């Protein structure tokens, strides 16, 4: 248990921050400072423009020495922002850093009560009185250092996850790359070309896929999902479900004693398989068999059986012959790996744009989504790169592009945010049809063209120069001629101030993006928060965009919010760097907010053991009787046990009952106004 | 810069300064429109979905997006004196599709309300008011209609105030409460 200095008269210093005018604009600093000086145990009360600045911190250091302080209170911003700063100052002054207490008079006060200066000042006094009450009872605490497992996990093997895994692996860290589909590559492998360079997407991606496959430090786990997570930074125990693939890799075959066997990707099984299903990689526009690969460049090149549609006829087993790669009775396997840090890179799905019926998706044959366009224009796609109308296979000459389809939509049906890469890929689509179809005219219906990246505006210039027609107006609705299956796009050319009715052969909806289906489940397993639109929440939108509020878990790519490929790769490298730091340091300090058992009070009833959500508590024999024991590294300091213990035998460090009672008393009894 | 005088009213009008100045705005106008229309008119981002959806726009000079803009910019006189204000059929297509969840139709209704307070109402609307007061219908039954109804096996008069004229007095009571007939009579008389 933390040491308690007995018979010590608390000596508290209070420091009130102006934060420029952020606080001083609505809180009367002088009044608050004088009030603080009048509080019991307060021996010094001071104020400063910016307490977080070096002179501000020095004030704390000097005051601790000069007034022999036992506790420090800073009334300023949120502890999430500057608690570490002031703890350091407290430590530099010679006190245990946990003798510092923060009163938030900015986020929870001056910012919300900007136009109520009197009330804000009164509330600031309350906050300081409460903080002083707690500071008078604070104890010395010592953070616990725990070793960090020298391994990392990346969930999702799109371009972001692959880059993060490569960076970690190349930094010498064993990395588990978990992917739910049978191949790595993600969304980027479905794209034909990439803006603004017009690189072939697969051509620049496949070398990376091969690098991932060959990297000795990467353990590639495709067709695998995260099943459960236990532990904390440095020591995550992640349970994975290796879904039954029905096909053995050469290594797996060898482990079963089949020498020289296992899948070599020859594809003989596919020829004999009688079951035909739509290929999800081609968005259902091409068939696949019950035993399949998504596309010829998959990594790893191992076939997969879709057991939901397989009729177990056994023809593939015969075709496979001596390789004996196919096991129709294969079952899912669970495995547990221990990692120090985790990066989530779970990507995105296309918003189901049929929910906006005015554009006719799934109702009119020739209205397609942008991702379907990518497959139709791609040389390895279902049409060999020949863009055709789904209704009759004809080559479209006039193609309408509907931007912001479901994005920037506050109706509650679509998505309120900008999906961020649709403008640019639609420009690219316009280029592709001009390039591939002589005489083709793209009509781009837009609200704003957001060409914000490097060489993006130049790309916009180029596409305009190539002859794309830009109509500044959001598409109101689309009608279909039932005979010709041509489409009539109704909108207003807002620059002409005139309604337009454009007859086209095909419409491409630049549909909004949303978090992938697995995102919600995965984030709950790892205890990561999300923002109201479902994207995973970064620790700080500007200063910590790769971290999360869960220590040891980081974010890469679109799962954190819509991003194009350059931004995804950049964030992945940032996340890999952040995730490697604890591993390279070898140890992390845990905040010492552990539950502690007061053994003389503990009756050994064990009720707390079952209540603990983190399995941190157990009953042990000590001096001939049972008492509770805390595994400090597992305890998150949630307080469930402490609040429940019928004997008051659990001491929640830093949030102990006497400290909290003192805070409540200070609030309820201490106000003089 | 001093304005050049041409001493020619036609030329003066032709060369009139048409720039928008902040002082052209009445900021209360937007507030009034939002209060009466109960919709967030200031959130319009001018995408044109409203005009694109409008069945009136392709056949007239009515541009609902421009009225939204005039609301945002506080151009009260321009909006309220524009005869296009009365070309909305209140079909609510724009309201259905607005991506910002604004009800442009209700903005138009609010503007008509404000225009009416200034007695700016087209004569046909006023005559419709009088007809409703007299018959309970904006478009009363007529002989052509009666013949058509007879042919279809219907009663000559529909089961409305035409069949039950005793209910007209209820309609009149509502209209009198708001002074609609009185206003219509007065404005029409002034226009004679």
Image (cartoon, rainbow, N blue to C red):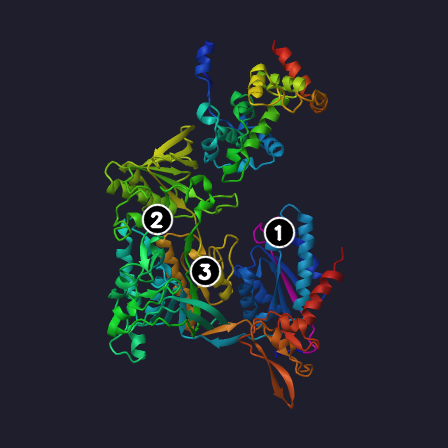
Q: CA distance from mark 1 to mark 2?
A: 51 Å
Q: Identify the residue at horizontal 29%, vertical 54% (top origin).
A: A201
Whether label 1 touches label 2, CB < 8 Å: no
Q: Identify the residue at horizontal 62%, vertical 79% (top origin).
A: A3
Q: Quadrant of the N terminus of chain A?
A: bottom right
Of labels 3 and 1, earlier in sequence is: 1
Q: State which chain disc 1 sits on.
A: A
Q: How dense is the environment of label 2, judged by Cα within 10 Å: few (below 14), some, or many (20 and up)? A: many
Position of A235 with respect to A190 (left or right) is right
Q: Residue beneath label 2, please?
A: A372
Q: State which chain disc 3 sits on.
A: A
Q: How dense is the environment of label 3, judged by Cα within 10 Å: few (below 14), some, or many (20 and up)? A: some
In this view, the residue in front, A26 or A394, is A394
Q: Quadrant of the C terminus of chain A?
A: bottom right
Q: CA distance from mark 3 to mark 1?
A: 40 Å
Question: Residue B38 at what x, y percent from top left?
Answer: 61, 35
Q: Residue beneath label 3, please?
A: A518
Dots 3 and 1 on the same chain: yes
Say which mark, if any, is on residue A110: 1
Question: Residue B28 at what x, y percent from top left?
Answer: 60, 30
Dots 3 and 2 on the same chain: yes
Magenta residues, start to end: A6-25
Work out whether residue B47 can be spotted.
yes
Question: Residue B186 at what x, y percent from top left?
Answer: 66, 14
Q: Identify the residue at horizontal 31%, vertical 53% (top origin).
A: A286
* Tag 2 secondary structure: helix
Of labels 3 and 2, earlier in sequence is: 2
Q: Quadrant of residue A469?
A: top left
Say which mark, if any, is on residue A175: none
């Amino acid at each position: 248990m933390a040491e308690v200095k007995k018979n010590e008269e608390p000596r508290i210093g209070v420091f009130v921050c102006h934060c420029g005018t952020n606080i001083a604009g609505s809180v009367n600093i002088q009044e608050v400072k004088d009030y603080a000086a009048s509080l019991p145990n307060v021996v010094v009360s001071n104020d400063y423009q910016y307490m977080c600045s070096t002179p501000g911190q020095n004030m704390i250091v000097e005051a601790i020495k000069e007034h022999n302080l036992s506790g420090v209170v800073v009334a300023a911003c949120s502890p999430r922002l500057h608690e570490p700063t002031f703890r350091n100052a407290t430590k530099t002054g010679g006190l245990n850093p946990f003798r510092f207490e923060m009163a938030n008079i900015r986020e929870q006060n001056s910012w919300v009560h900007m136009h109520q200066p009197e009330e804000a000042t009164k509330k600031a006094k309350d906050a300081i009185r409460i903080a002083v009450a707690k500071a008078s009872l604070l104890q010395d605490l010592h953070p616990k250092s725990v070793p960090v497992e020298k391994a990392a996990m990346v969930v999702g093997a799109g371009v972001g996850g692959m880059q993060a895994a490569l960076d970690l692996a190349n930094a010498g860290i064993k990395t588990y790359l978990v992917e739910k589909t049978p191949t790595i590559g993600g969304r980027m492998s479905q794209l034909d070309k990439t803006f603004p360079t017009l690189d072939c997407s697969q051509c620049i991606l496949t070398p990376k896929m091969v690098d991932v496959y060959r990297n000795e430090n990467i353990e590639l786990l495709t067709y695998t999902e995260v099943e459960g997570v236990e532990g904390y930074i440095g020591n995550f125990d992640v349970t994975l479900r290796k879904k039954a693939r029905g096909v053995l890799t050469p290594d797996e075959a060898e482990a079963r004693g089949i020498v020289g066997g296992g899948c070599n990707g020859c594809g003989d099984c596919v020829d004999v398989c009688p079951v035909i299903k739509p290929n999800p990689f081609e968005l259902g526009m091409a068939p696949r068999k019950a035993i399949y690969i998504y596309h010829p460049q998959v990594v790893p090149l191992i076939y997969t059986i879709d057991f939901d549609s397989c009729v177990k006829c056994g023809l593939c087993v015969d075709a496979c012959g001596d390789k004996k790669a196919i096991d129709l009775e294969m079952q899912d396997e669970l495995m547990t790996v221990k990692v120090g840090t985790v990066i989530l890179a779970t990507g995105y799905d296309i918003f189901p744009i049929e929910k906006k019926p005015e554009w006719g998706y799934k109702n009119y044959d020739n209205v397609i989504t942008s991702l379907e366009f990518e497959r139709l224009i791609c040389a390895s796609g279902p049409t060999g790169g020949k863009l055709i109308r789904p209704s009759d296979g004809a080559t479209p000459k006039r193609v309408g592009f509907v931007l912001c389809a479901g994005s920037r939509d506050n109706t509650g049906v679509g998505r309120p945010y900008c999906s961020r890469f649709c403008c640019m890929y639609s420009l690219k689509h316009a280029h592709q049809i001009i390039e591939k179809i002589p005489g083709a005219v793209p009509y781009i219906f837009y609200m704003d063209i957001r060409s914000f990246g490097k060489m993006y505006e130049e790309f916009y210039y180029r596409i305009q120069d190539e002859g794309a027609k830009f109509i500044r107006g959001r598409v109101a609705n689309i009608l279909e001629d039932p005979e010709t299956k041509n489409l009539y796009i109704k909108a207003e050319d807002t620059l002409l101030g005139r309604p337009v009715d454009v007859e086209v052969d095909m419409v491409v909806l630049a549909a909004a993006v949303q978090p992938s289906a697995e995102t919600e489940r995965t984030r709950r397993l790892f205890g990561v928060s999300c923002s109201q639109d479902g994207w995973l929440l970064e620790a700080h939108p500007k200063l910590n965009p790769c971290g999360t509020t869960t220590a040891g878990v980081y974010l890469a790519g679109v799962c954190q919010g819509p991003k194009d490929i350059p931004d995804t790769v950049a964030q992945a490298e940032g996340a890999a760097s952040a995730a490697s730091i604890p591993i390279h340091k070898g140890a992390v300090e845990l905040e010492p907010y552990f539950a502690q058992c007061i053994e003389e009070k503990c009756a050994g009833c064990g009720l707390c053991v079952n209540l603990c959500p983190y399995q941190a508590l157990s009953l042990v024999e000590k001096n001939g009787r049972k008492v509770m024991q805390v595994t400090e590294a597992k305890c998150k300091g949630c307080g469930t046990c402490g609040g429940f213990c019928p004997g008051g035998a659990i001491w929640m460090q830093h949030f102990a009952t006497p400290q909290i009672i003192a805070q409540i008393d200070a609030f309820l009894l201490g106000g003089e106004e | 810069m001093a304005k050049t005088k041409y001493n020619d009213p036609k030329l003066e009008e032709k060369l009139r300064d048409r720039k928008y100045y902040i002082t052209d705005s009445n900021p209360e106008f937007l507030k009034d429109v939002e209060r009466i229309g109960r919709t967030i008119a200031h959130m319009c981002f001018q995408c044109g979905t409203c005009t694109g959806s409008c069945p009136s726009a392709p056949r007239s000079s009515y541009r609902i997006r421009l009225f939204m803009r005039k609301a945002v910019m506080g151009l009260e006189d321009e909006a309220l004196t524009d005869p296009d204000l009365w070309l909305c059929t209140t079909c609510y297509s724009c309201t259905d599709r607005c991506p910002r969840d604004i009800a442009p139709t209700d903005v138009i209704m609010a503007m008509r309300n404000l225009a009416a307070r200034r007695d700016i109402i087209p004569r046909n609307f006023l005559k419709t008011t009088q007809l409703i007061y007299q018959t309970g219908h904006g478009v009363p039954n007529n002989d052509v209609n009666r013949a058509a109804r007879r042919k279809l096996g219907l009663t000559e008069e529909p089961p409305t105030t035409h069949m039950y004229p005793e209910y007209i007095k209820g309609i009149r009571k509502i209209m009198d409460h708001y002074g609609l007939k009185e206003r219509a009579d007065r404005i029409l008389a002034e226009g004679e």
